[in-house]
Amino acid sequence: MEQLKLKGQSAIITGADSGIGKGVALAMAAAGAKITVNYAHNGDAAQELVDEIKASGGEAIAVQADVSKEHDVQNMFSKHLDAFGYLDILVNNAGLQKDAAFVDMTLEDWNTVIDVNLTGQFLCSREAAKLFIKQGIREGVSRAAGKIICMSSVHEVIPWAGHVNYAASKGGISLFMKSVAQELAPHKIRVTGIGPGAIQTPINKDAWETPEALNKLLTLIPYKRIGKTEDIGLLATWLASDEADYITGTTIFIDGGMTLYPGFVDNG
Ligand code: NAD
């Protein structure tokens, strides 16, 4: 029988009570990892996911933390260590949008998105890196001393009018991820990005909930289907596994071709 890809490992997944984070938590738990399901507000949804993971024979806890608050993040890492004793994987998934025309964008809209989407990844990654360096390589568990996965977006490279704060946060994640990867590689810590295209979750409900909206969205997707959270779960699990041991400092786009400039398909 094939060995589970993340057997004996444990992961913190931020914003795991919904959407992509939930898909990643289910996939990593199915691959043998013990999971901290982080949530900001919806404790019931987080507990339901914990129960689902346990019902399938996995191990998980739910931990409340606002990833943009230093104290909350440190507390989340302590709770994870109290429960599982070590950490192998961090998935920086928590994110949000506060959309507005550029000239109407308030400082609060700007700050909220940068605080959660970018500063949240900094705070969580810093705690994880300190821990990974202290732990070192756990022989027989993984070839790396730790893995950090940063949930980015196709808007790491595709400009997005009306979403300037969001696109800036994702563009920021790109060089954040690469710089941290460069700095931590000698410690045998791998840092990678995932750049989803359109994945069916609550964050982009307006873009898929009616047939008209979905058809419009599909004009941007050469592969002609919307992504599922399972697509991201499988990629994140593989990226965290030893099968991806030589991958660090790069974003993998998982977008049905959204970054292929589909507007040029019939000669622009
Ligand atoms: P979602 O709204 O279902 O999930 C976002 C999660 O982040 C929620 O659990 C939310 O509670 C959590 N969150 C928000 N603020 C938080 C905070 N301060 N602290 C902790 N958690 C917080 O949306 P999703 O689509 O699953 O988004 C997950 C990630 O994927 C985000 O980073 C998003 O930018 C990225 N992404 C999504 C898509 C897509 O098409 N759905 C595409 C590209 C990138």
Image (cartoon, rainbow, N blue to C red):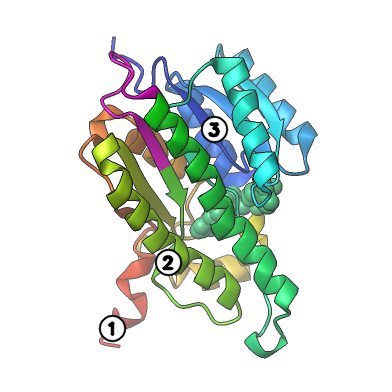
Residue under the image location 67 percent in, 33 percent down:
75
- Residue 57 place in picture, x, y as percent: 56, 11
Compute the Cα span from label 1 to label 2.
Answer: 25 Å
Most prominent secondary structure in the magenta stretch?
Answer: loop
Q: Secondary structure at mark 3?
A: strand
Neighbourhood count class around disc 2 (C-alpha, 10 Å): few under 14, some 14–19, many 20 upward: many
The quadrant of the picture occupied by the C terminus is bottom left
Q: Amino acid at mark 2?
A: Glu
Q: Secondary structure at mark 2?
A: helix
Q: Is residue 186 above or below residue 81?
A: below
The quadrant of the picture occupied by the N terminus is top left
Query: Which residue is label 3 attached to?
Result: 12
In reply to whether residue 208 is colored magenta, the answer given is: no
Q: Is residue 166 above or below residue 64?
A: below
Q: Amino acid at mark 3?
A: Ile
Q: Is residue 240 visible?
A: yes
Query: Which residue is label 1 attached to?
Result: 266
**Closer-to-camera residue (83/123):** 123
Q: Which residues are magenta?
A: 135-148
Q: Is residue 147 above or below residue 198?
A: above
**Contact between labelled residues 3 and 2, with CB atoms less than 8 Å apart:** no
Q: Is residue 177 above or below residue 2?
A: below
Residue under the image location 57 percent in, 57 percent down:
119
